[in-house]
Image (tube, rainbow, N blue to C red):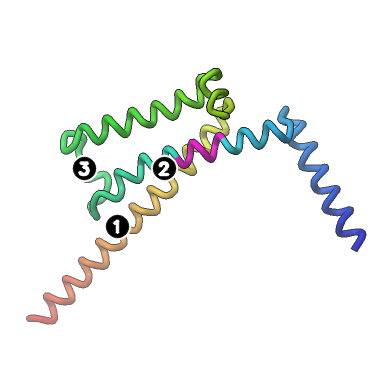
Amino acid sequence: MKQAYETDAEELLREQQTDAARGLTAAEAVMVGQTMAFLVTGFTSVLHVLTVRSRKMLYKYRVKDNPQLYISCGAMIVFFVLLAAIPPVAGFFGLTALGWQQWLIVAALTLAPTLVAEYGKLWDAIRSRTAEKNRVAWNK
């Protein structure tokens, strides 16, 4: 039992040393994580508007079909970026500056749900095409 506590304590110490080696205190690491979570949530919400409007694949839409939607989505993304990138504004909202690695992680985590939703649409389209072919073949 005592060894389990010592192992956990050693692991926690190792994690803190790793964060310290990167130049982050524990409080700063929490701030970076919270900022990243806020940005992923915000960006994903904006992109979600584009994916849920119909069962059509996202790439089949043109900007001229609904320019106001694309302008507002672009404006919100720029707003979120500026909110996190301008230090006085970020500090006011409890956010912190991110490095380029963190921005890449935010981008990847933001795109993941969109890619999953688009894959679901693709899979549904394939299944409905197959079902239609079977229905037509059955009626012949």
Query: Which residue position is annotated with label 1?
Result: 122
- Decide which of tag 1 and tag 3 comes sooner along the chain: 3
Q: Indicate whether 122 appears above or below 88.
A: below
Residue at 57% in and 32% down: 101
- Count the labels in the image: 3
Amino acid type, mark 3: Tyr
| The N terminus lies in quadrant | bottom right
Report whether 55 appears left or right of 82: left
- Decide which of tag 2 and tag 3 comes sooner along the chain: 2
Query: Which residue position is annotated with label 3?
Result: 61
- Residue at the extreme left: 140
Per the rendered image, the range of residues in magenta is 35-41
Residue at 35% in and 55% down: 119
Query: Which residue position is annotated with label 2?
Result: 44
Secondary structure beneath dot 3 equals loop
Report whether 131 appears left or right of 50: left
As measured in the structure, the alpha-carbon distance from the residue carrying label 2 to the one carrying label 1 is 20 Å
| The C terminus lies in quadrant | bottom left
